[in-house]
Image (tube, coloured by chain):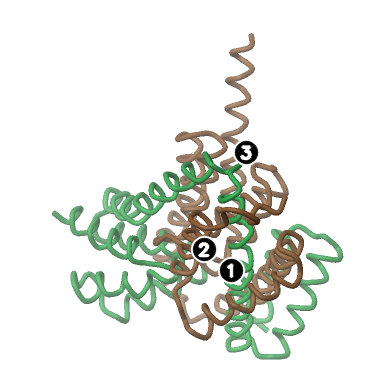
Amino acid sequence: MIYWYLFLAFFIPGILGYGGGPASIPLVEKEVVDRYEWMTTQEFGEVLALGNALPGPIATKMAGYIGYAEGGIGGAIVALFASVAPSLILMVILMVTLLKYKDSPKVKNITKLVRPVIAVLLGAMTLQFFMTSIESSGTIQTIVLIIVSYWLLEIRKVHPAFVILMALVYGAVSGIV
Amino acid sequence: MEKEQVKSSKLKTNKDLFLAFFRVGLLGFGGGPAAIPLFHREAVVNYKWMTEDEFGDTLALGNTMPGPIATKMAGYIGYRVNGVIGCLVALMATVVPTVGLMIILLGILQKYKNLEWVNSMSAAVVPVVGVMLAIMTWDFFQKSGKSLGMGRAILFTTLAVILLEFLNIHPAIVIFGILIVSLTSFKKGGDSK
């Protein structure tokens, strides 16, 4: 029975979470804390904080961990499947349909007209990241990190992996000092 | 002989898919959206699995649909490159390492969760992701200028800002709107090329 509840608890946020993984976090909390009472708000907050400190998509980290805590490996698999499969299947079906007609001028127009929307969405996300950074690291440190990472990424063409690793090391060192 | 070659190239494709999404999963600090510039880097720049345009379409449609964005992107790109197997390989590479890490580390880190350096490590990555997103934003805007003409690009971008940021209309609705308008109108003149 726990598997069925785990499936429901993650299927619903997956289907309703518009706006990427982070958008589904409050929905997951509703299921996990309010409905099924697997965790207290405090415990959920701790799992979320740690999930945010680790790399990788947040929705699947939450699903995998909570599934594991409640139902072992089987629980982790069920929770992951419920949060990943429905939206992915929808995506594949729609994209394949769209690609079939990709040479039609109408479909080409979609690409052209959607571009400004994507630019705005990305721009909004950019601002959000900068604001978060100012809140947690302070204005001066944020500006310095922005300039240095821009210089490394765009002018020196350093691979993003290295820039991220450098930021991690810098963060760890500045946290210890 | 030829069969062998096909088989080994499939194997190589799966290995590439796994490595690409493994890197994205392990470096994407800040949740799924933080991984988008990294997906772009692997799928368009490194492996050339899709063009800029196709990536833009995938991202747009991915944002229109519910659910985690990272797994939608990984699963779809994997499917495009190597069918259902590719889809599964890409998903495994994105999800399994980070979930495994989470389960293992949660036990250990529960003890040290208040440590300053753990927190400041993840804080330092945030502006770097911001810069990557800013660069992508600029790219999309410039491309838009090329395909629509600068005047119309600025007009549509302004419109999008008003709809999305000021009127707070959900992106899914805006994107669906464009889809419907594009498919039903533009009988003539829409195809500029």
The crowding category of the residue bearing disc 3, from other C-alpha atoms within 10 Å (few below 14, some 14 to 19, many at least 20), is some
> Chain under label 2?
B
**Looking at the rendering, in which quadrant would you find the N terminus of chain B?**
top right
Q: Is residue A150 left or right of residue B120?
A: right
Give me the C-alpha separation between circle 1 and circle 2. Answer: 10 Å
Out of B25 and B65, give the one closest to the viewer: B65
Looking at the image, is A32 positioned above or below residue A162? below
Mark linked to residue B178 = 2
Which of marks 3 and 2 precedes in the sequence?
3
Mark linked to residue B57 = none
Q: Nearer the viewer, mark 3 or mark 1?
A: 1
**Identity of the amino acid at label 3?**
Asp
Chain coloured green in this rendering? A
**Whole-percent x, y for residue B135 in the image:** 73, 68
Chain coloured brown in this rendering? B
Out of B169 and B14, give the one closest to the viewer: B169
**Identity of the amino acid at label 1?**
Val
Q: Name the residue under label 1.
A: A117
Looking at the image, is B44 positioned above or below residue A174? above
Q: Is residue B71 left or right of residue A174?
A: left
The crowding category of the residue bearing disc 1, from other C-alpha atoms within 10 Å (few below 14, some 14 to 19, many at least 20), is many
Q: Nearer the viewer, mark 1 or mark 2?
A: 2
Q: In this view, does A31 lie to the left or right of B153?
A: left
Q: Which residue is drawn at 17% across and 56% down?
A: A2
C-beta proximity under 8 Å, tags 1 and 2: yes
Mark linked to residue B16 = 3
**Whole-percent x, y for residue A152 in the image:** 81, 67
Give the secondary structure at mark 2: helix
> Chain under label 3?
B
Q: Which residue is drawn at 66% across and 69% down?
A: B133
